């Protein structure tokens, strides 16, 4: 849902609109316009109205949306026609999707697809040869992390390193840097390796027990979890199916991330979780989200303030407004990008996990936040990192390993490592408090009231920490952290900080009421 579900928003947007009504240019910080970068001529309200196109990801996606829609429309139409016409199953569909995806990759990366297939083929051989070895997982991680780092360090390599004969291929590198997309391919290569490795072992997944508890599976459909946990047939671990999985066009650029088991099983039998009517409704909701984003980028230039470093000239209250706005902009941006590609995949008959299942303004602890932000990546991490590392028994240690990997997986930047370690630092107290509260049992109404208030206070602190960590990681960087703290320790800043904590506290209490209402309806 795109519903705004927290009282900070109840304060936040009316506050912006209040200033808008007082401003001739319909923006509270209009006197800083000349310093903003990334504003383009808009199409809403009036010809003079500018649109915030300062975010590279969103600008590229928005610009290429028509051609992407056309290409994926043709691809999914062909895939569905051939499936019906020739009764194609796993092997036939893998060949078809590999061919269609190869056309797509040739346009994106040109001759650089040779690098992709060379690394992918090496990984396939490694998996097939060493899958039953005790040290297999160590080899798998070393191989994939090694290429993850090398791809970034050498910026996707150059054909000239193979000699002058190959140098001319550097003139045909396509329209999109291959090593950026390859981060997702690395996750898929690891998924294939683990799933093939586990296919040789006795499954720990209790399918009957799962079906008894899952309302989707009870209805005769297959939920994503059962598709993921159920081992694929040994005949599905072929080179063609593997390559088709790595470069599957609808999910290639941005995901969501899908496991090999679930992909292979849905090549054989298309997903039946969502009906045609539900898929159409899913697409219509996405259109509504796009309209909301257009309205937001025409009215509020939050990201332009952040990327232009103009937030340094704002008051503490305005910094809070811009900071909170940037996080909501980021959520809506990824919401639209991920849901677009997931929608295309659903039309093709392959379900991927939902990446943004919950609104960002309805998360009051770090655990629920990370289960709702890039949720398919979270599922991947739980399956292929968290559980193999020891799960909840080593939770305090695992989070440092996992978030460090998440940071370097995104990019080799110091500010991302700062974001990762700040998040871990904020995560440790939450885990300790949760461990203590699980052992606590309220003996009366007073104990219950105190416990709920403490949870609300903890949620307030967590939301604040999330804002700080994301601002440091994606906006101001580590160098701006001390400046941000100094602003909020000033006389005016302390008042704003107190008001900010109050709104987050009220918002957390509202989330509790929403959660209680949902439980009472079930």
Image (cartoon, grey):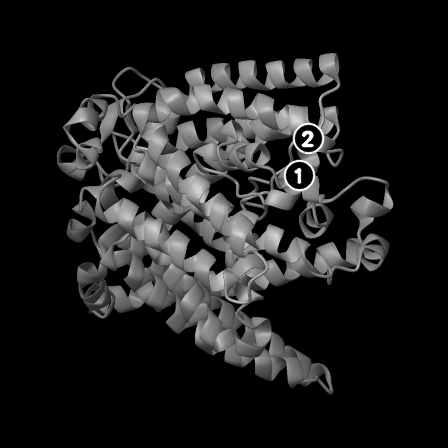
Q: How many residues crowd mark 2 within 10 Å: few (<14), some (14–19), many (20+)?
A: some
User: Residue, x 72% and y 50% (percent of image)?
Assistant: 230
Mark 2 and mark 1: Cα distance apart in space? 7 Å
| Looking at the image, residue 301 lies above or below residue 309 | above
Q: How many residues crowd mark 1 within 10 Å: few (<14), some (14–19), many (20+)?
A: many
Q: Quadrant of the C terminus?
A: bottom right
Note whether residue 467 is visible. Answer: yes
Query: Helix or strand or loop: what does disc 1 sit on?
Result: helix
Q: Residue furthest bottom?
A: 443
Q: Tell me if 90 is positioned left or right of 14 in this view.
A: right
Q: Quadrant of the N terminus?
A: top right
| Looking at the image, residue 408 lies above or below residue 325 | below
**Residue 309, percent from left and from top:** 18, 47
User: Residue, x 73% and y 85% (percent of image)?
Assistant: 444
Q: Which mark is residue 351?
A: none
Query: Helix or strand or loop: what does disc 2 sit on?
Result: helix
Q: Quadrant of residue 62?
A: top left
Dot 1 corresponds to which residue?
236
User: Residue, x 55% and y 39% (percent of image)?
Assistant: 2
User: Residue, x 50% and y 37% (percent of image)?
Assistant: 246
Dot 2 corresponds to which residue?
90
């Amino acid at each position: 849902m795109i519903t705004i579900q927290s009282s900070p928003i109840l304060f936040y947007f009316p506050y912006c609109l209040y200033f808008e009504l007082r401003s001739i240019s319909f923006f509270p910080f209009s006197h800083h316009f000349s310093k903003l970068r990334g504003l383009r001529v808009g199409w809403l309200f009036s010809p003079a109205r500018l649109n915030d196109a300062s975010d590279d990801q969103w600008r590229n996606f928005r610009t290429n949306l028509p051609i992407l829609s056309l290409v994926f429309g043709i691809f999914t139409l062909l895939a569905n026609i051939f499936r019906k016409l020739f009764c194609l199953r796993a092997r036939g569909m893998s060949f078809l999707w590999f061919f269609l995806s190869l056309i797509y990759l040739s346009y994106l990366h040109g001759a650089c697809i040779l690098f992709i297939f060379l690394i992918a083929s090496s990984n396939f051989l490694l998996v097939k040869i060493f899958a039953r070895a005790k040290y297999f997982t160590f080899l798998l991680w070393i191989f994939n992390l090694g290429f993850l780092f090398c791809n970034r360090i050498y910026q996707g390599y150059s054909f000239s390193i193979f000699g002058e004969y190959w140098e001319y291929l550097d003139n045909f590198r396509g329209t999109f840097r291959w090593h950026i997309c390859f981060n997702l391919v690395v996750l898929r290569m690891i998924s294939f390796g683990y799933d093939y490795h586990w296919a040789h072992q006795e499954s720990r997944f209790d399918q009957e027990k799962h079906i008894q508890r899952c309302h989707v599976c009870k209805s005769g459909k297959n939920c994503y979890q059962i598709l993921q946990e159920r081992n694929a047939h040994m005949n599905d671990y072929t080179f063609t199916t593997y390559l088709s999985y790595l470069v599957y066009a609808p999910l290639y650029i941005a995901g969501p991330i899908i496991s090999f088991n679930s992909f292979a099983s849905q090549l054989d039998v298309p997903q039946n979780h969502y009906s045609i009517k539900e898929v159409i409704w899913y697409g219509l909701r996405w259109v509504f989200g796009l309209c909301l984003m257009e309205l937001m980028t025409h009215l509020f230039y939050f990201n332009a303030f952040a990327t232009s470093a103009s937030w340094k000239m704002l008051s503490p209250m305005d910094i809070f407004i811009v900071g909170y706005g940037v996080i909501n902009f980021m959520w809506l941006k990824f919401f639209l990008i991920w849901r677009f590609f997931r929608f295309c995949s659903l039309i093709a008959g392959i379900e991927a996990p939902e990446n943004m299942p919950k609104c960002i303004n309805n998360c009051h602890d770090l655990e629920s936040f990370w289960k709702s932000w890039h949720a398919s990546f979270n599922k991947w991490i739980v399956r292929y990192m968290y559980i193999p590392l020891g799960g909840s028994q080593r939770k305090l240690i695992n989070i440092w390993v996992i978030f460090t990997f998440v940071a370097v997986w995104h990019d080799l930047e110091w500010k991302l490592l700062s974001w990762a370690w700040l998040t871990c630092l904020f995560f440790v107290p939450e885990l300790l408090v949760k461990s203590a509260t699980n052992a606590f049992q309220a003996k009366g109404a007073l104990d219950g009231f105190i416990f709920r208030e403490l949870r609300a206070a903890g949620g307030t602190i967590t939301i604040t920490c999330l804002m700080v960590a994301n601002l440091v990681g994606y906006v101001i960087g580590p160098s701006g952290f001390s400046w941000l703290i100094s602003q909020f320790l000033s006389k005016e800043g302390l008042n704003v900080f107190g008001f900010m904590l109050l709104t987050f506290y009220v918002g957390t209490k509202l989330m509790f009421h929403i959660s209680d209402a949902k439980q009472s309806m079930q």
